Amino acid sequence: MQLFLPDEASTLALGARLAAELQPGDCLLLEGDLGAGKSCLARGIARALGVSGELPSPTFPIVLEHALPGGRRLCHMDLYRLDSPEEVQGFGIEDYLNDRAAICLIEWPDRLGWLRPPHARSVSLRPEAEGRVAEWD
């Protein structure tokens, strides 16, 4: 599916739409270049899942966990600063990917290499005109 997103509000709205389909154990890979809107989309998903308060990008801590209603968790990962699957392993990301109570959002999933979960869904974002285009499976 493909959708043109003219502004931040439409990107947040797509996040809410995607959040309605996510279940514990799901992994959503957020792909796109710097500034494509991955973190904005992740904020839309997190808000729709019930996360309140500040939602910074996990660029420096790599992983941010958020408690969700019903004992579930949202694990938002930003792998931008990592260079290889070996470095990814050092952060214990496999534990998050195998956690059946967690929903995982992963920015820069190309860093996962062989760790990329076969069950993961992808959303790709790219700039177009004054907005961006989202494509997902």
Image (cartoon, helix red, strand yellow):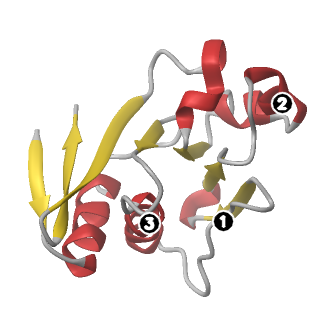
Q: Earlier in the sequence, mark 3 or mark 1?
A: 3
Residue at the spot 22% in from the left edge and 31% down from the top edge: 137
In front here: 11 or 72? 11
In front here: 14 or 95? 14
Location of residue 1 in the rendering, given as x and y in whole percent from the top left corner: 11, 38
Location of residue 121 in the rendering, given as x and y in whole percent from the top left corner: 37, 31
Residue at the spot 89% in from the left edge and 32% down from the top edge: 90
Residue 123 quadrant: top left
Q: Earlier in the sequence, mark 3 or mark 2?
A: 3
Residue at the spot 43% in from the left edge and 57% down from the top edge: 38
Q: Which numbered mark, 1 or 2, is in the foreground of this view?
A: 2
The correct choice, above or below, for 72 with respect to 23 in the image is below
Q: Which residue is mark 1?
A: 67
Left or right: 82 in relation to 11: right
Residue 111 quadrant: top right
Q: Which residue is mark 2?
A: 87
Residue at the spot 83% in from the left edge and 30% down from the top edge: 87
Amino acid type, callout 1: Ala
Amino acid type, callout 3: Leu
Location of residue 113 in the rendering, given as x and y in whole percent from the top left corner: 62, 18
In front here: 129 or 102? 129
